[in-house]
Image (cartoon, rainbow, N blue to C red):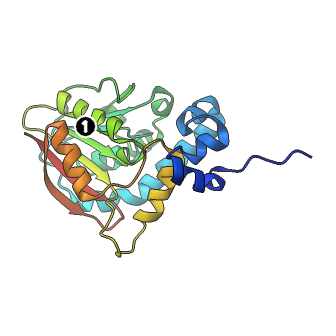
Amino acid sequence: MQAKAPRPWGHLYDSVKTGTPGFVLAHGMPTYDFLESHPELAACFNRWMSKQSAQQNTAILDAYDFSKFQVVADIGGGQGSTLAAVLERYPSLQGILFDKPSVVAQPAPLDASGVRARCDVVGGDMLEALPRDADLYMVKRVLMICGDAEALTVLKNCVAHVRSGGKVLVVEMVMPPVGVSGPAATFDILMLLANEGGRIRRESEFRELFAEAGLKLDRMIPTRSSNVLLEGTLV
């Protein structure tokens, strides 16, 4: 009987040594390529991501005032759970949901919340180009799956498309100082196993990324969830 190949966690030692994601070592391809080639698993993954977002949305909305904006673009926003919550609380806002075409094909949270009429749904690649003319570009739990080069490209694309006077809002975990407990360290290992260059960054690393992208990190706003809101303005 042929032994089964070890799952990603079984490659943790090799991932720590080489930086190659355990998922690639276990399955021979990056996580999101694997999901694209297994649509039945991708559908389950996308539904799980929507449910996970729903658990964090209230904490984000309670921590940040979206009322000063007109159009909010959710970049890498999945099926729209977070954007739906924002539009539901702020009836004057318009929204843009942007993610891979296969992901945004079924934006069920937008329909369930009754906000679909106020939202454009756009499929594309965030490393190439984004929809134009939003005055807030929100990037939630996207940079953690990216290496520095990709994360910088995403931020630069936001800077290139945001309206004058607009903002970029990054929603991420932030790695605490050494010795401070929390979920970030565990997620850091998960990102290492799942994504090339993925990790939970420290405040100093975010400041460097923002500066290189042409942004000033004005505020870091804690929430009641594990997320921190990092608000940037154009330099």
Q: Give whichever of 115, 32 is nearer the camera.
A: 32
x then y, percent, for residue 69: 14, 42
Query: Can residue 161 be seen from the camera position used here?
Result: yes
| Residue lying at the far right of the rendered structure | 1
Q: Name the residue at 42% across, 53% down.
A: 53
Query: Can residue 91 be seen from the camera position used here?
Result: no
Which amino acid type corresponds to the residue marked 1 in the rendered image?
Leu
- Few, some or many residues within 10 Å of mark 1 (<14, 14–19, 20+): many
- Disc 1: which residue: 155
Q: Give whichever of 71, 30 is nearer the camera.
A: 30
Q: Name the residue at 33% across, 62% down.
A: 175
x then y, percent, for residue 120: 32, 29
Above or below 177: residue 89: above
Q: Name the residue at 28% across, 59% down.
A: 228
Q: Give whichever of 11, 78 is nearer the camera.
A: 11
x then y, percent, for residue 37: 62, 29
x then y, percent, for residue 123: 40, 26
Q: In the visual, does 35 lie left or right of 80?
A: right
Above or below 176: residue 165: above
Q: Quadrant of the C terminus?
A: top left
Q: Which element is circle 1 on? A: helix
| Residue lying at the far front of the rendered structure | 17
